[in-house]
Image (spheres, rainbow, N blue to C red):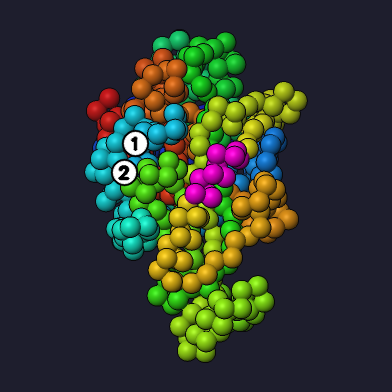
């Protein structure tokens, strides 16, 4: 059943088994799953059925630190959430992404990959994709592998609206913004939903699941904590901290044998063994074929700076044995305390809730991950005589990261992770391994804000797997 909260704030069920807040990939999955189990669900969605300025404005905020996207363009605030304009790249996290890594104290999960594996098949069907091919080791000695990837076209609002309409158990309420949360210190008693005219109602449920995205989950919990004078999240928990992105830059051009660029685009990375040997986090490279003129320009450049290698390449171009490629990298950022979501002290949204202040920087250690991984890849290409790479100047200079707006790079992946990280203890995290907020018996978080580390995989497939795992955990509660 659909209720438009902007028409009336009355008519909500008196109480439901579950109240889910947010209808992106995380919240939509949890709500529909729990509904399918025959449990009653109220799904609160802040935005409407379509994008609107009044809703999008609530996503405004400031970023302190490295250049970053405008926060209200980096996510969407209406039915289906940010899946309304995502790219749909889907890659599962690997085994080592969950494990401890020497030299990186906080980059591991309290659960193993096998805890998520049972939910892969269903997550793929929700995203309407085939399982990405298993990674293929291209060279054991250098530890180079090709990474499997699938492309989803699912916009959750469009694809699942009919199922919401047909559900006997899910009441979805649009234009219903979570603006407050009441707790007795151990259990959440109700949440307040407010429409864009400022009218509110309390929503009661036995369990509450916040699925408002990788920045908003932190912001709303920080706000709830402020309102309840610290009764919502244990003050020892690192709420808002260890926030992460996937830095993403063009890192060079390469002339490679066709064998290396056998498809228009190839995704490669390092094997777990080599990452361990190099003590590095995860990094992957997109080898993307250039048009013919691009190849010719690269050969001309190479002839000037390295005539021998240039001659090697020139002699092959005509025979179509070599092609020009651009090399892009996106990689894992170390989770650090300093990267965090904070409540603005000066700016508020229309409901009087402080806007987001995101503190985000890439560090020298993040650069080291890129450099080590690139060097390894370069060694492989050279040793196997697969081609020649020309790195973009900043990568191995002391210039630091460039401003992505100037270099026309992506800069980052729009992947908002951390802030309500999962951990074994409240000192290290905000939620336990079942995604339950430490200190609250009936409050759960869905989405990438629970990721304690991000690997280099696009997060949404993992988000959906985690949402299914949470639903299974909750189905009998
Ligand atoms: C341009 C772009 C490209 C991307 N490409 C990829 C990709 O290729 N692969 C990939 O894996 N990921 C990609 N992502 C990231 C992906 O979109 C997110 O990982 C995913 O949408 C997160 O799902 P979510 O449900 O946790 O959050 P969201 O999708 O952000 O959904 C959050 C929901 O909560 C609602 N909400 C927020 N606040 C409130 C409130 N106070 N009250 C009620 N409701 C509220 C919002 O309206 C929204 O519906 C991309 C993102 C962008 C911006």
Residue 33: % across, % down: 31, 41
The answer for how far apart the CA atoms under marks 1 and 2 are is: 7 Å
Q: Which mark is residue 95?
A: 2
Q: Position of residue 336 (x, y in %)?
A: 54, 30
Q: Point out residue 408 in the picture as x, y percentages from the top left corner.
A: 68, 59
* Depicted 87 relative to depicted 231: above or below: below
Q: Is residue 143 left or right of residue 323?
A: left
Q: Quadrant of residue 463?
A: top left
* Residue that mark 1 sits on: 99
39 and 416: which one is in front?
Answer: 416
Which residues fall within the magenta stretch?
362-372
Marks 1 and 2 close (CB-CB < 8 Å) = yes
Label 2 crowd (10 A; few <14 / some 14-19 / many >=20): few
- Which quadrant would the N terminus be assigned to in this image? top left
Instruction: Looking at this view, name the residue that lies furthest to the front.
Output: 308
Q: Residue at x 59, y 55 (%)?
A: 249
């Amino acid at each position: 059943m659909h209720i438009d909260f902007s028409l009336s704030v009355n008519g909500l069920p008196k109480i439901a088994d579950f109240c889910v807040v947010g209808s992106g990939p995380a919240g939509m999955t949890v709500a529909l799953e729990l509904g399918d189990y025959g449990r009653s669900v109220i799904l609160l969605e802040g935005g409407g059925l379509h994008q609107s300025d009044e809703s999008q404005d609530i996503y405004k905020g400031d970023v302190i630190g490295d250049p970053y996207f405008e926060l209200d363009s980096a996510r969407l605030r209406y039915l289906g959430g940010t899946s309304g304009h995502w790219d749909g790249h889907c890659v599962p996290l690997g085994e080592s992404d969950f494990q401890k890594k020497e030299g990186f104290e906080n980059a591991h999960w309290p659960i193993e990959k096998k805890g998520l594996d049972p939910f892969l098949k269903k997550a793929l069907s929700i995203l309407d994709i085939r399982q990405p091919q298993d990674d293929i080791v291209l060279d054991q000695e250098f530890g180079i592998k090709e990474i499997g990837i699938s492309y989803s076209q699912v916009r959750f609002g469009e694809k699942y609206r009919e199922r919401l309409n047909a559900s006997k158990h899910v009441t979805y309420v649009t234009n219903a913004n979570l603006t407050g949360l009441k707790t007795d210190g151990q259990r959440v008693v109700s949440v307040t939903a407010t429409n864009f005219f400022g009218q509110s109602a309390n929503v009661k449920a036995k369990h509450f699941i916040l699925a408002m995205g990788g920045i908003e989950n932190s912001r709303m919990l920080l706000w709830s904590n402020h309102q309840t004078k610290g009764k919502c999240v244990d003050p020892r928990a690192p709420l808002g901290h260890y926030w992460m992105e996937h830095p993403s830059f063009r890192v060079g051009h390469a002339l490679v044998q066709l064998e290396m660029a056998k498809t228009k685009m190839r995704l490669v990375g390092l094997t777990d063994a080599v990452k361990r040997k190099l003590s590095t986090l995860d990094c992957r490279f997109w080898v993307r074929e250039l048009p013919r003129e691009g190849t010719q320009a690269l050969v001309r450049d190479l002839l000037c700076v390295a005539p021998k290698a240039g001659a090697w390449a020139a002699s092959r171009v005509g025979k179509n044995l070599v092609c020009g490629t651009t090399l892009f990298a996106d990689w894992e950022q170390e989770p650090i305390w300093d990267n965090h979501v904070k409540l603005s002290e000066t700016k508020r949204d229309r409901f009087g809730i402080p806007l987001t202040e995101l503190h985000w920087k890439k560090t020298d250690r993040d650069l080291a991950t890129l450099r080590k991984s690139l060097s390894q890849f370069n060694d492989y290409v050279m040793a196997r005589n697969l081609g020649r790479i020309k790195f973009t100047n900043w990568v191995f200079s002391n210039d630091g990261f460039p401003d992505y707006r100037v270099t026309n790079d992506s800069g980052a992946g729009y992947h908002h992770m951390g802030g309500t990280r999962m951990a074994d203890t409240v000192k290290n995290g905000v939620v336990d391994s079942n995604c339950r907020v430490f200190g609250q018996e009936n409050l759960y978080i869905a989405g990438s804000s629970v990721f304690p580390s991000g690997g280099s995989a696009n997060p949404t497939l993992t988000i959906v797997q985690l949402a299914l795992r949470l639903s299974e955990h909750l189905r009998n509660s």
